[in-house]
Image (tube, grey):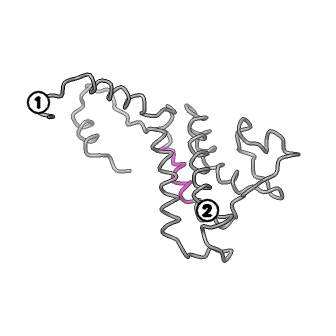
Amino acid sequence: MEILPLLKKVLESNPYGGIDIEKLECVGHVQKRCGTRLRRLKAQNKGLKLEDGKGLSGLGRLTDKKIDTLQNYYGMAIRQNAGNLQAMVLAVKSVLDHVASSDTDPKHQHCDPHWCGYLKDPSSYKHKNSLPRSVVEFIRPIFNDLADEKLLSRCLHGKTQNANESLNKLIWDRCELAPSLK
């Protein structure tokens, strides 16, 4: 991943004299990347037939609603494993197995029992709207990228930047703007 120009300048200036600066990611923004990448993939591959002869999107395939679900599961995988990189990576990778599971082929061995309905009650759980294997394999490279240890290590804190943005707004609302900012 490319270092942002401003971050690069800050790192080069060594403002804290030997104390390393680490860029953390807002979990909400990283979660949004999941949805953005899946929507872009869907748009770029309109009309493409997958190995099962059907398209990527449409009924029972990669719909906007399913993308929202995948994005939410991705965010939960990060937040519920804050502080544990290996568990976070495994949870992110298991998202695809969870949504590909069916009554005849359940794949929940790495799911979190707190949110996975199948693990709560396997005997009565009925899988609905499972993603076909061809769709799962087509989107797997995106999830492999999103499970990158370098990326997820910057999310170990499990937080968003919403509180910081809110504080900045409060400060600026109460301050007179400097003449150079008018």
Please state the horizontal and vertical placement of residue 63, each as a whole percent of the image.
Answer: 60, 61
Task: Categorize mark 1 by other alpha carbons within 10 Å: few (<14), some (14-19), many (20+).
Answer: few
What element does badge 1 sit on? helix
Please state the horizontal and vertical placement of residue 103, each as a whole percent of the image.
Answer: 82, 56
Label for residue 179? 1
Three-letter amino acid code at the position of disc 1: Pro
Res 91 → quadrant? top right
In the picture shown, does residue 24 fall above or below 46? above
Label for residue 120? none
Residue placed most toward the observer, 149 or 105: 105
Residue at image mark 2: 62
What element does badge 2 sit on? loop
Three-letter amino acid code at the position of disc 2: Leu
Query: Alpha-carbon distance for marks 2 and 1?
Result: 51 Å
Q: Which residues are magenta?
A: 141-151
Identify the residue at image location x=71%, y=44%.
110
Chief secondary structure of the magenta portion: helix
Q: Are marks 2 and 1 in contact (CB under 8 Å)?
A: no
Question: Extreme right residue here?
Answer: 123
Question: Extreme top residue here?
Answer: 174
**Is 119 placed left or right of 90 in the picture?**
right
Mark nearer the N terminus (2 vs 1)? 2
Please state the horizontal and vertical placement of residue 119, each as a whole percent of the image.
Answer: 79, 41
Identify the residue at image location x=42%, y=33%.
161
Judge whether residue 104 is colored magenta: no
Identify the residue at image location x=25%, y=36%.
10
Query: Which one is in front in this view, the residue at disc 2 or the one at disc 1?
Result: 1
Identify the residue at image location x=62%, y=39%.
87
Please state the horizontal and vertical placement of residue 166, each as a whole percent of the image.
Answer: 38, 29
Q: Quadrant of the C terminus?
A: top left
